[in-house]
Amino acid sequence: MSDLTGRHVVLGVTGGIAVYKACEVVSRLRKMGAAVHVIMTKNATEFVAPLTFETLSNHPVVTDTFARPETWEVEHIALAKRADVFVIAPATANCLAKMVCGIADDMLTTTVLATKAPVLVAPTMNTGMWTAEATRQNVGTLKTRGVRFVGPESGMLACGDTGAGRMSEPVEIVEAIVGLLCPKQDMAGLRVMVTAGATRERFDPVRYMTNDSSGKMGFAVAEAARARGAEVTVIAGHTTAQEPQGVNIVRVDATLELRDAVVSRAPDADIVIQAAAPADYRFAETHAEKYKKRKGEPLVVELVENPDIAAEVGRMKRPGQTLVGFAAETGQKLSNARQKLDKKNLDLIVFNDVTAPGAGFNVDTNIATLVTRESETACSLRTKRELADDILDAVMALRTK
Ligand code: PMT
């Protein structure tokens, strides 16, 4: 059993028949040593009395924003700040919709809006509500903002229908909470090199050729590897994403520089993950001074091929090393990804169709297929941070084979 002593879980409870299961969540968390602070909506109190949660959590239950007029403002900010994780179980369709819009009309929605803690929701609702376009879009929006979901499960619902919408079991919700509070350290002692961002090929001091890579995907992988205990070096081209903390970042400009930085460090890395988008070509001729426009004359430039860095790292591959590449394709061209897997001597390639909505360049989410020699694993729309953990799970599974 994980030790959650000293960790604060704020549990928001909204009105649904699954409220009784939230009692078991509190009880399990308390057995692990966590301090649990419960906020109930008015509707939730119709299902289970606050006294039950008060007794189980050993803390007062907050039920109404205006119950203590002299303290409520402080109280909701205090709870938002105290949370190491903010859980909403059960979370109704109404609650998800309010979170999307930033509506803060009760203590629960006010507090979740203010928190900076990771947010986990366990939805529960009728199948029709869960599959409704409005809910689909709300879930997608919350996921892109980094809200984590556990469930819902499929099965017989309280209303008598059968389908998706049943709240996950308390044991699964608690497992998800533990996952957020105590990320696994399965990469401790491993050295991971990640490439991220776009390279720039200079034509003259003011003009260059590049692409839309923001570095979000590579940085997410670096962040996830660090959180799992790895020692991480990022070789980054040009990026607009927020840099990850606690990793060593080496900056490069053009593909040739990226090549030198990667090839010189690759022998020391246990795992190399190449999420960067290096320019495949560079200008054959470059100019030290700004190239003067010649009116009426077309400008014809010659491009020469850049080295394929992943292929070079693949040729240098040493025993015990795991190599991961990305395949940025336009369209569902999984066969191209397979070819790259072989040509670059990779163990895993992350195929992403960069034309699919919510996938590819400069967005917070991605849709990918993890391709190894033996398997193909589809990863539907999720945050790049979530995909990063899926990639690392696949890498660790390959390394223990
Ligand atoms: O940075 P973001 O905005 O988050 O966008 C993420 C991403 C779309 C850039 C990322 O998910 C992605 O797909 N990265 C790979 C982009 C790419 O160059 O794909 P490719 O299919 O052209 O190359 C295949 C692999 O070879 C890649 O691992 C690439 O890093 C590598 N490569 C490519 C060209 C080159 N000259 N040398 C290489 O090593």
Image (cartoon, helix red, strand yellow):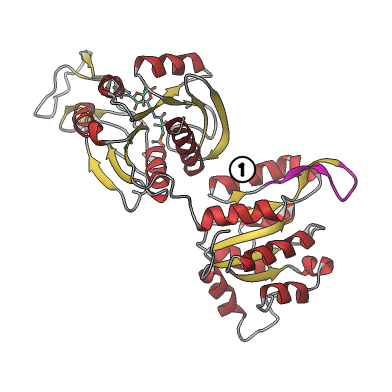
Q: In the displayed structure, does residue 350 sit left or right of residue 288?
A: right
Task: Note whether 89 is above or below 205 in the view shown.
Answer: below
Give the number of marks: 1
Quarter of image, ligand 1:
top left
- Left or right of 266 on screen, residue 357: right
* Location of residue 326 in the rendering, given as x and y in whole percent from the top left corner: 41, 27
Identify which amino acid the numbered label 1 is placed on: Gly
Q: Residue at x 54, y 75 (%)?
A: 78
Residue 156 belongs to magenta span: yes
Q: Quadrant of residue 25?
A: bottom right
Residue appearing at x 65%, y 78% in the figure? 59
User: Magenta includes 31?
Assistant: no
Examine the rendering and report whether any part of residue 231 can be seen: yes
Residue at the spot of label 1: 140
The extreme left residue here reads 288
| Segment tinted magenta in the rendering | 151-161
Which part of the image, by quadrant, shows the N terminus? bottom right
Q: Position of residue 181 (x, y in %)?
A: 52, 58
Q: Residue at x 35, y 49 (%)?
A: 244
Q: Kindly state the secondary structure of the residue where label 1 is placed.
A: helix
Predominant SS along the magenta part? loop
Residue sitting nearer the eye, 36 or 279: 36
Q: Nearer the viewer, residue 315 or 215?
A: 315
Residue 215 on image: x %, y %:
36, 39
> Could you tell whether 213 is left or right of 306 in the image?
right
**Residue 262, quarter of the rendered image:** top left
